Each structure stands twice: as C-alpha cells, then as structure tokens.
Image (cartoon, rainbow, N blue to C red):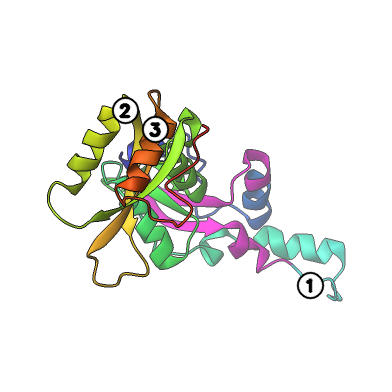
Amino acid sequence: MFVKDRMSSSVVCVDPDTSFPEALTMMKEKGVRRLPVVRDGKLVGIVTELDLLKYAPSPATSLSIWELNYLLSRLKVSEVMKRDVITVGPDEPIEDAALLMRQHRIGGLPVVRDGEVVGMITETDIFDAFVDMLGLRRGGTRIVVKLRNEVGALHALTGHIKDYCANILSVVTLPVASIPDESYYLAILRVGGGDIPGLIKALDQMGYCAAEDGCGQAAS
C-alpha cells in the first residue's frame, strides 16, 4: 500500500500573501487543520490551525474589536507558516508516512512530486489504512499466535489453517514485547469459514497460542 492509495487528492492550498482571517476561514469552511502554502505551483511552506491560533488575541487584551480585526487582517500566512516542510512522495510506502508523522509529531504531510503538491495524507488516513490492514471491516475471527522467528514458521501455521478449511482474511506480525531477543514474534490473523472452533482448539494444543486464555474466541 502506497501513499497515493490513501492520500486526499483534493488539496486546499493558500498563497503566502493570504491573510490570517482568510486562512482561518478557509480551514473552518473546508474542515481541514493544515494548509500547504504554494507560490507559482511550488510548495513553500505549511500553516496549521495551531500556528494561526497562536496569533489569536488574548481575551484579556485591551484592544477594541476594530483594532484587532485591523491588525489580524494585515497578518499574512507567510509570517506564521513553517518553511521547513516535512513531505512525502506519492509512491512511498504508507508506513514511511506513518513513521515520519510519528518521528516529527505531526498530524499530516503534504504529498509532493517534483515540488508540486499532489495530495495530503493525515493521521486519519493512516488510521483507516491500519483498520483495513487488520481486516476489521471484513469480519471473521481474530486469532493471536506466537511463532518462532525462523524460516517456514508462518508457512507451517497457514498449513494448519488450511487443514480446517479456514480462509485467512488478514495477517499482521509484530515483536513480542516480553522477549527482547526476538526469538519469537506475534501473528495477528483474522480468519473466516471452515471449522474455526476446531482450529482454535488445535492451535492451542500445538502450543501456538500467545495468551493463557487461548488464541481467540470461537465465535466470529
């Protein structure tokens, strides 16, 4: 799965000379929290709702509403935007975008090709992809197993699943937090069809289950 598969292609952009009130109004009307700043078709910055709110007047200000409106109307996006923009390419894996957001603690990335903004990908897009990767919208039964970190371990597991005529809807692997040497890893699967109760019982008897209460629930 790539960034282009999950990004929003309808990007709301602003010019550096856009005023503070115009940018804030645009965010509210379009339901977005960040605006790429573009000049001559090229990305030059990004402004977020938080950036703008930092410049909002304090309730304790002694200025009149007319004075405030005048001052804010003169404030340009170029004065509050971030110029060092973290971006991602449309053909990069979506997990790379997720890692960038996590490392830089940001909620969205402009998607850029040759300096031109072609999309936006946000934390919501990442969450949706995560939900789909785990197969949550496909139903089935969730099974968690512990596998030895060796060649053929996952293949052997899928063979047991096949023996019970079950279909693998999704599979995700991750380290076992309690085993720092990485000799085992967890596999989280969603399976459907076949004899699911029989499969879970068999996996439990073969020592696959990661939890004391078994691999999963017999009901989907």
The verdict on residue 47 being magenta is yes
Q: Point out the frontmost of discs 3 and 1.
A: 3
Q: Identity of the amino acid at label 3?
A: Gly
Q: Which residues are magenta?
A: 27-56
Question: Where is 153 relative to 184, above or below?
Answer: above
Q: Regarding mark 2 in the picture, which secondary structure is present there?
A: loop
Q: Quadrant of residue 41?
A: top left
**For the residues bearing labels 3 and 2, Cβ distance under 8 angstroms:** yes
Question: Where is 82 relative to 13, above or below?
Answer: below
Residue at numbered disc 3: 198
Estimate the spatial distance between the alpha carbons at disc 3 and disc 2, rounded to whole Å: 7 Å
Q: Badge 3: how crowded within 10 Å, few (<14), some, or many (20+)?
A: few
In the drawing, what numbered circle is on residue 154?
none
The verdict on residue 112 being magenta is no
Q: Residue at x 61, y 62 (%)?
A: 50
Q: Residue at x 54, y 66 (%)?
A: 79
Residue at numbered disc 1: 58
Q: Identity of the amino acid at label 1?
A: Ser
Q: Badge 1: how crowded within 10 Å, few (<14), some, or many (20+)?
A: few
Residue 94 vs residue 33: left or right?
Answer: left
Q: Residue furthest front?
A: 205
Q: Regarding mark 1 in the picture, which secondary structure is present there?
A: loop
Asked whether 162 or 79 is in front, the reply is: 162
Q: Residue at x 32, y 50 (%)?
A: 208
Residue at numbered disc 2: 164
Residue 183 vs residue 138: left or right?
Answer: left
Task: Mark 3 or mark 1: name the one nearer the start of the chain.
Answer: 1
